[in-house]
Image (tube, rainbow, N blue to C red):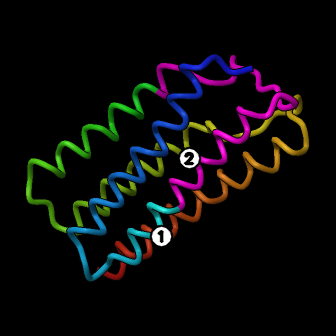
Amino acid sequence: MIKPTIVQYLIGNEELLAQLYKMYSQKYSSHADFWGRLSDDEKAHAQKIKTITEENSTDIDKSRFNEKGLESFKNAAESEIERFTNKDLDIKQALASASKLEKTLANSKFFESTDKDSDELKSRLQDISESVDKHKERIEKMINRI
């Protein structure tokens, strides 16, 4: 099974994104639905990860995860929350930040399955991975509209 620190990073990173997007939804009320949906998706990702790791039948190879990469992502998300809290960012800056975080998450391949994974695990990881890709697309579309 994944050692707890890896699980905590995976869940925590999704929860940090949910928190950031929730903050954006409160500040940018004209786009609250957009940010709210992203936040809800991130909460769902965290829940899926919890479910995956709680199931005794699902064995995940911990060596597939780069702990430094997970920590780096966590630090980047926390920095964005702090930056948002301390500065008056406009929506374009928020979108640029979200785009960068989602691209980093996608490029990290944290949710890529391997041949060793069960079909059920592959399906769940694929769901999260596809959702990250959809987030990138939705954010890019919003950038182009604003």
Horizontally, residue 134 falls left or right of residue 27, namely right
Horizontal side of 106 relative to 64 (left or right) equals left
Where is residue 137 shown, x and y percent of the image? 52, 67
- The quadrant in which residue 77 appears is top left
For residue 43: magenta?
Answer: yes
Nearest to viewer (mark 1 / mark 2): 1
Q: Which mark is residue 8?
A: none
Front-lying residue, 22 or 141? 22
Whether 111 is drawn above or below 145: the answer is: above
Q: Quadrant of the C terminus?
A: bottom left
Quadrant that contains the N terminus: top right
Residue in view at x 43 percent, y 67 percent: 139
Q: Classify mark 1: residues with Cα within 10 Å, few (<14), some (14-19) or many (20+).
A: some
Label the magenta part by its dominant secondary structure. helix
- Please report the residue visible at 70 percent of the width from the left and 42 percent of the height from the top: 51
Nearest the camera: 73 or 145?
73
Q: Which residue is mark 1?
A: 37
Q: CA distance from mark 1 to mark 2?
A: 18 Å
Picture layout, residue 32 above or below residue 98 = below
Amino acid type, residue under disc 2 in the picture? Ala
Residue 55: where, in percent of width, then height?
Answer: 79, 34
Tag 1: residue type?
A: Arg
Secondary structure type for disc 2: helix
Q: Position of residue 31 (x, y in %)?
A: 32, 78
81 sits to left or right of 50: left
Residue beneath label 2, please? 106
Residue shown at the point (41%, 49%) measured from the top left: 17
Residues in magenta, as a range: 41-70
Q: How many badges with numbers are in the image?
A: 2
